[in-house]
Amino acid sequence: MPLLPFHDLQGQSEKNEEVLSNGLLSNKVPISGWREEMVYSCCCAKIQRETKGKPEMIDVSKDTFEGTVTGCVDYQKLLNTAQLNAVTHLNGPHLVIAGAGTGKTRTLVFRVAYLVEQGVDPRSILLLTFTRKSAQEMMHRASRILDNRCSRVSGGTFHSFGNLILRKYAGTIGYSNSFTILDRTDAEEVLAMLRTELGFHQAKTRFPRKDALMNVISRSVNTGASLAEILARQYPQYAHHEDNVCKLAEEYARYKLNKSMMDYDDLLSNLKRLLEEYESVRIRLSNTYRYIMVDEYQDTNRLQAKIVQLLASEHRNVMVVGDDSQSIYSFRGANFRNIMDFPKLFPGTTVTTLEQNYRSTQPILSLTNAIISNAREKYSKKLFSNLPGRQKPWYVRPKSQFHQAELVCRQVREFVRNGTPLSDIAVLFRSGWHSNDLEVELAAHRIEFVKYGGLKFVEAAHVKDVLAFLRVGFNLKDAIAWRRVLMLLDGVGGATANRIIRSIVDNGHGYDGLASGTFSKKKYGEALAGLRDLIHRMNALELDLKDEVRMIMDFYNPYFEGKYEDFESRRNDLASLVQIAERYDSVEKFLSDLTIEPPEASRGNFPGEASRGDRLVLSTIHSAKGLEWEHVFLIHLVDGCLPSSYSVFNPESLEEERRLFYVAATRARKSLYLIAPRIEGGNEYTSYGGPSRFLFEIRDLEKLTQRRSAQ
DNA sequence: TAGCGGCGTTTTTTT
DNA sequence: AACGCCGCTA
């Protein structure tokens, strides 16, 4: 079953529960749960509880607690002073600066429980997190501390929240509520089309490429800076195209509105516009969500901050949590200074700083402190740990990438032999493809793994093909999906696709435009008729989504086999897609979820059930955010990889690369491997070969790490 | 004019 | 693996 992140409050207030204007419930409903009957015996990792007479062991190592049979959660015993201070903060703005591993999530989880225990309606708590998964996990953990009421908290990402609200209020801002969502590639495609249509591509001097255009426009939306400013700062070589870039941006906005499409940024900017321009909506939403919490606040941008401010306008109950040292999303317009500006946005903010680390041993912490101490700008926190363990991080320099892979495989096996589950070991790297050679080696050693980050399976061409069929059925005007579908047909290229789309969308013929006389005589006429038939069948009946997808697969199959040489291996992804579709009953939710919050595993891993097994974790550092493992390998610690060669000419992005290194190293609980292979084949631009400059700059590297030969 | 296949280049990170 | 560029063919 798809876990839908938000519970919608409107009209759902339950009997016996009246939500008062302060967000508290007037009647506390007696909880029917295990809490009253549990017999507990608490130890470090497990407690035994008894539900209706059946004993059951549950692992609460992350949220160990000692409840009393009748009473409440004993917060004082379970939290340190700083955490307790944040958790029991009730009203007004509050900022939590939480260093890596200091119990940030734990604090949020307990605060949810605390609020609920104080009688706050869980549905009026809005928990905005970086991924849907972390929201779910937090609610789950809160449910275990208190009871099931906690699972009714509203939670998810800014984008999914935007989608939820906009599906309801699209009409208010002049949009159709059956809008489709463009992912990054789709959005760039639109820009490329418009650029050609406006004739900008044949300018005397080179006009920006589609990805650069998207960067500029997106950055402007997310930071509030003008296109001109961003062009001047980031792309001075295109500054003279300013007028046309502005025209293109306007055209792009108009196009999306006309065609009922929103890109990722629109989910935020339209939400902001809705809240800003329609007071009654703002008041209603603000009264619905009386307690707002934002996780990973260091990675939010100005637009998101503004949304939080508007949502909180009626009560100012906002708690944000973050760590400026872990800000790694500046390419999305985030700025670590945002977190420091929070008190300015909300005068009267109180602050808690969490400094005791509960994750890593002191030797690991000493190294990570040394890494971040080289940051140009930071707000000082001094992390300390009381965890036992004297093992220093290892520093290894294998002879080649191959030796690096060998080393990891061997060491992983060793850990497994000593009883560590594979899933408690991770290999982290800067870019998706850095693990390519390792993946081959792992397969040879028969070590199973899941990979996070890099090319996601929803981004694979064949999966996008299938989704495009659903999209044109859902939103007739989705020209990008039309293009994709039409160009599958023999004899149809970009130009013909455009003509057909014009007939469907602009001439108002609708789906019957596919069968118009001009096209039916062409060699693709028959294929078009088949397509029209498919869409009619899809939309006419009350079909299950699953059946729609099956029909699409049947139609698509011959094109699929013709288009991809390796179609046999790609078929797995399509099977996964069908599996996921089975969990949904609405096309809209299926499409939105896949676009906004796709299954996080990459292509080739079966998303969903299959990924639950005990597997080694491979992940980009970005995707490893917020997670931790017993043993962590950091591979490709080579200049040009980390820091990325793209960042080395810009001091600010270089600083961010250092924070990335810091985030990666702070994921480890017991052991950490820094691996810097000698890499052949670098050029003067990438400057591959040497160990990362971030290693050289650590003053006591020799003391803080142990050298180890790769053999 | 449009479609299409071949070839070389290039890969940051993500909602 | 995907994109841009080029030249061949209908």
Image (cartoon, coloured by chain):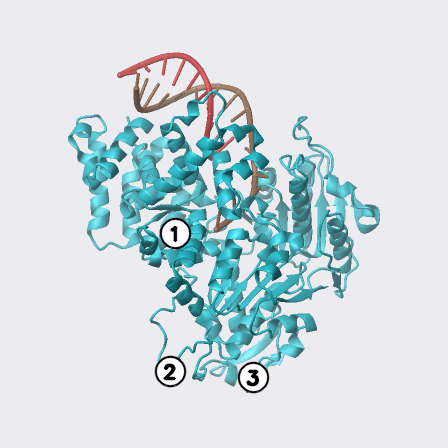
Chain colours: A cyan, B brown, C red
Q: Residue furthest left?
A: A517
Q: Which of A550 and A304 is in front in this view?
A: A304
- Judged left or right of residue A149, residue A381 is right
Residue C6 percent across, percent down from the top left: 44, 15
Question: What kind of element bears circle 1?
Answer: helix
Q: Which residue is identified by label 3?
A: A39
Residue A473 sits above or below residue A189 on the image = below
Residue A259 in view of the camera = no
- Quadrant containing the C terminus of chain A in the rendered view: top right
Q: Distance between the residues labelled 3 and 2?
A: 30 Å
Kindly identify the residue that appears in the image at 27 percent across and 55 percent down.
A544
Q: Nearer the viewer, mark 3 or mark 2?
A: 2
Q: Residue furthest bottom?
A: A70
Question: What kind of element bears circle 3?
Answer: loop
Q: Nearer the viewer, residue A510 or A103?
A: A510
Q: Nearer the viewer, mark 1 or mark 3?
A: 1
Kindly identify the residue that appears in the image at 52 percent across and 28 percent down.
A240
**Letter of the chain that mark 1 sits on in the rendering:** A
Question: What kind of element bears circle 2?
Answer: loop
Q: Which residue is identified by label 1?
A: A592
Residue A491 percent across, percent down from the top left: 28, 26
Q: Which residue is identified by label 2?
A: A16
- Say whether disc 1 or disc 3 marks the residue closer to the N-terminus: 3
| Residue A84 placement: quadrant | bottom right
**Letter of the chain that mark 2 sits on in the rendering:** A
Q: How far apart are marks 1 and 3 (CA)?
A: 43 Å
Kindly identify the residue that appears in the image at 43 percent across and 22 percent down.
A202
- Say whether disc 3 or disc 2 marks the residue closer to the N-terminus: 2
Label 1 is placed on what type of residue?
Ser
Q: Do the residues labelled 2 and 1 touch (CB within 8 Å)?
A: no
